[in-house]
Amino acid sequence: MASAPFRPAWQEAGPHRPRYRALILSQEGLVLRTERVPADDDPAALAIAETLDGAHAVELWDGLRFIERFEVAAAPARPRDGISLRR
């Protein structure tokens, strides 16, 4: 009797409960830390991940599935003390 080929659990057919994680990244792209994202679907997870840690890039993952990367928001340019940008 031939057995069915081995398939990892993440490849099994059928719905799965999402397990969202946010990776907080350094400027070099290294993982500084991970955070669990308590959401039931992609739109909710995206909304939460977008608000995490504005000082670093954030990647959102559901298990092995990459969803989105949020870059660091650029800070507005400020004039130096005593220097005016007006002419």
Image (spheres, rainbow, N blue to C red):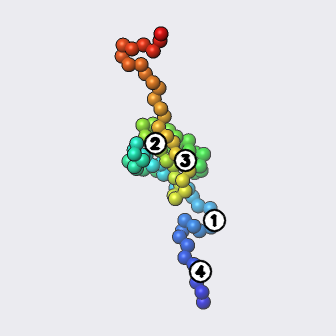
Is there CB contact under 8 Å for labels 1 and 3?
no
Q: Position of residue 53 (x, y in %)?
A: 44, 39
Count every numbered label the image shows and give the total: 4
Q: Where is residue 67 in the image (x, y as percent from the top left)?
A: 56, 50
Question: Residue under circle 4?
Answer: 4
Q: In this view, does 30 lie to the left or right of 16?
A: left
Say the numbered circle drawn on residue 57.
2
Report the mark closest to the observer, 2 or 4.
2
Question: Residue under circle 3?
Answer: 68
Q: What residue type is labelled 4?
A: Ala
Is there CB contact under 8 Å for labels 2 and 4?
no
Q: Which of marks 3 and 4 is nearer the N terminus?
A: 4
Q: Is residue 73 left or right of residue 1?
A: left
Q: Which amino acid does label 1 sit on?
A: Gly
- Element under disc 4: loop
Q: Which residue is drawn at 55% across and 56% down?
A: 65
Q: Which of marks 1 and 3 is nearer the N terminus?
A: 1
Instruction: State the quadrant of the N terminus.
Output: bottom right
Q: Is residue 38 visible?
A: no
Q: Earlier in the sequence, mark 3 or mark 2?
A: 2
Q: Residue at x 47, y 32 (%)?
A: 74
Alpha carbon of mark 1 to alpha carbon of mark 3: how far?
23 Å
Q: Position of residue 40 (x, y in %)?
A: 57, 51
Say few, some or many: other residues with alpha carbon within 10 Å of mark 4 (under 14 / 14 to 19 / 20 or more).
Answer: few
Alpha carbon of mark 2 to alpha carbon of mark 4: how far?
42 Å
Question: Residue under circle 1?
Answer: 14
Q: Position of residue 18 (x, y in %)?
A: 56, 56
Q: In which quarter of the image is residue 26?
A: top left
Q: Residue at x 54, y 68 (%)?
A: 9
Judge whether 6 appears above or below 52 on screen: below
